[in-house]
Image: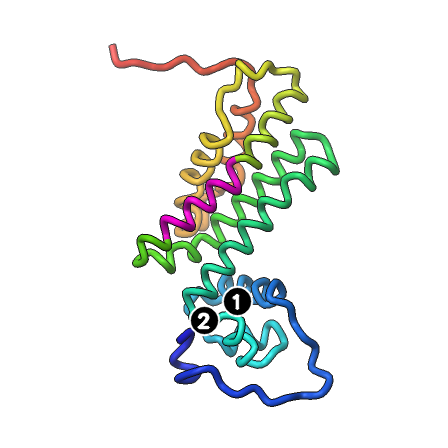
Amino acid sequence: MIDTQDSPGPPAEPRQVGRPRRSPQALLDAAAEVFVESGVDAPVRQIAAKAGVGMGTIYRHFPTRSELVVAVYRHQVEACAEAGPRLLAEQTAEVALREWVALFVDFLVTKHGLAGALHGDNAGSDALHAYFVDRLVPVCGTLLEAARAGRGIPEHEMALNGYSLLKGIGNLCIGATHDSDYNADELVQTLVSGALSGGRYPSVGVQ
């Protein structure tokens, strides 16, 4: 089950008059906060307390921990994907790109353990990675193209595409969780500045 230290199975949840109902999305938001604070092995009772519900509510929606982790991961990816069009509608394209990238960095640095929790399940991990790429690469590409168009840079002069930018950001964020002096945000914004520059970079070969 989700948490053997809490109980051997879904506990009966007493009926309490006046207890507010929580949507699955609200439960996932609470679980994400707890995972960031305490890791993906945090007790279910901690998630239930954060959400203001009984443990039975968590078990009813997510019978196993792996189901909960996958649901939280997908929920966070969706939130990141949906933020792109919203930011682009609210401000200039370059500002939207930079703010979205900052959200993406936060996702990678604080929530990356969600994917790692399923590392032993290759099929599950592969499916999550494919979902991640399918949802976020198009958003990143759209924001990047809009920001470069805003600078008057022709599309054929793009130094990076959405996939390459997302991959580069991911690589720059690797050390952030283990080194408090490592500032991933500054490095990523520098990468964005390079991606928004005109012209392609020449390949460098060994002489």
Q: Quadrant of residue 24?
A: bottom right
Q: How many marks?
A: 2
Question: In which quadrant of the rendered view does residue 81 lie?
Answer: top right
From the image, tell me which residue sits under label 2.
Answer: 42
- Where residue 50 appears, as percent x and y from the top left, is 59, 72
The vertical placement of 122 against 97, above or below, is below
Q: Nearer the viewer, residue 145 or 62?
A: 62
Examine the structure image and report whether residue 129 is included in the region drawn in magenta.
Answer: yes
**Which residue is under mark 1?**
34
**Mark 2 or 1 closer to N-term?**
1
Q: Which residue is located at x 43 percent, y 69 percent?
A: 65
Q: Is residue 91 left or right of residue 195?
A: right
Q: Which residues are magenta?
A: 125-137
**Whole-Å distance between the Cαs marked 2 and 1?**
7 Å
Residue 97 drawn at (x, y percent): 62, 34
Which quadrant, please, contains the N terminus?
Answer: bottom left
Q: Is residue 6 above or below residue 115?
A: below
Q: Residue 180: x percent and y percent?
A: 45, 50
Furthest residue toward top: 207
